[in-house]
Image: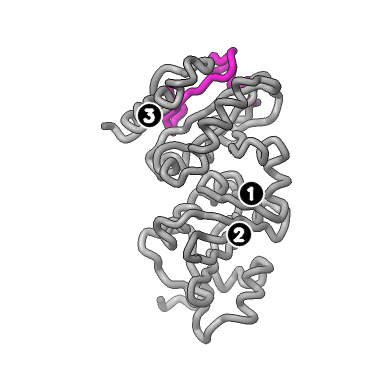
């Protein structure tokens, strides 16, 4: 390019995450800091090779350092919530077929940790820094991601062409715990299901703030009521626009067949989203 304007990567150098700065000081080969194109990378993210399998991702929502290893990906900082979908998409193309296994935060500000929950859904198995604190004890125990922003989830679902599976629960519900631990948590941790559904949890009756599919502010309880959910556990599979893809699964029904009900609901959701 003939422009004399510095690249976005150069303009943001002074704001590198701590881990990226350490890598730059100790392991950067000469000339390795120039952005290079990555096939299919999100246009809003610049990929800067640091060394070998280490990359700096520079985006509108902050900077992220990524290390690709034989068994998966380490992610240091997750940008903002708005940029997290593009971040996950870029990581998936940098490391095709490899799960995100570790997430670290160097700071608690939203440009370092705002995308934590979306990155968690992409498959992180071990979290550190302030990430575990953000999810809270209940989220860490359940292994599921509690819904906070369906507008952001919808963008990620659109990119992946998958439906959003929501389990509606309430505190003290024994069958809710069984559904989560016996069925949904294993699905959430299985890499194969990342290509089939995004899984979220909503607490019926809760006043916890929530962003709806349309971007409007609401609460978990109001969201559940709007979707006519009054019994738990209830599972609904929705399109990225927030519409139903089939009938809800209310209660635990027959445990021996419950996995089959879930599979059928996800398959119907995939057919609806992908137009097949």
Residue 82 in view (yes/no):
no
Q: Earlier in the sequence, mark 3 or mark 2?
A: 2
The residue pinned by badge 3 equals 269
The circle on residue 62 is 2
Furthest residue in direction left, as rendered? 276
Badge 3 density bin: few <14, some 14–19, many ≥20, Cα 10 Å = many
Q: Which of pointers 1 and 2 indicates the residue nearer the eye?
A: 1
Quarter holding the C terminus is top left
The residue pinned by badge 1 equals 114
Task: Look at the image and give the residue range highlighted in magenta.
Answer: 220-244
Badge 1 density bin: few <14, some 14–19, many ≥20, Cα 10 Å = many
- Indicate the position of residue 58 as horizontal and vertical percent values: 54, 64
Residue at 64% x, 80% y is: 25
Taking 17 as reference, is 59 left or right? left
Check if mark 1's residue and mark 2's residue have beta carbons within 8 Å.
yes
Say whether residue 230 is magenta. Answer: yes
Secondary element at tag 3: helix
């Amino acid at each position: 390019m003939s422009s004399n304007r510095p690249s976005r990567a150069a303009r943001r150098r002074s704001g590198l995450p701590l881990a990226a700065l350490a890598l730059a000081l100790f392991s950067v080969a000469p000339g390795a800091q120039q952005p290079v194109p990555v096939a299919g990378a999100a246009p809003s993210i610049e990929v800067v090779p640091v060394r070998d399998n280490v990359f700096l991702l520079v985006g509108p929502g902050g900077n992220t350092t990524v290390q690709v290893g034989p068994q998966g990906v380490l992610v240091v900082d997750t940008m903002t919530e708005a940029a997290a979908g593009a971040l996950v998409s870029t990581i998936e193309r940098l490391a095709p077929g490899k799960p995100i296994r570790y997430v670290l935060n160097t700071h608690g500000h939203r440009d370092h940790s705002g995308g934590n929950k979306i990155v968690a859904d992409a498959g992180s198995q071990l979290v550190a820094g302030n990430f575990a604190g953000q999810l809270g004890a209940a989220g860490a125990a359940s292994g599921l991601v509690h819904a906070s922003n369906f507008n952001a989830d919808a963008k990620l679902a659109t990119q992946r062409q998958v439906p959003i599976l929501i389990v509606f629960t309430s505190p003290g519900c024994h069958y809710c715990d069984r559904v989560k631990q016996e069925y949904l948590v294993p699905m959430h941790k299985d890499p194969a299901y990342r290509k089939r559904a995004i899984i979220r949890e909503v607490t019926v009756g809760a006043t916890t703030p929530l962003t709806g599919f349309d971007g409007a502010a609401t609460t978990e309880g109001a969201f559940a009521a709007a979707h006519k959910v009054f019994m738990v556990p209830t599972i609904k599979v929705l399109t990225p626009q927030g519409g139903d893809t089939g009938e809800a699964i209310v209660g635990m029904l027959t445990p021996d067949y419950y996995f089959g009900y879930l599979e059928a609901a996800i398959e119907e959701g995939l057919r609806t989203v992908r137009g097949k």
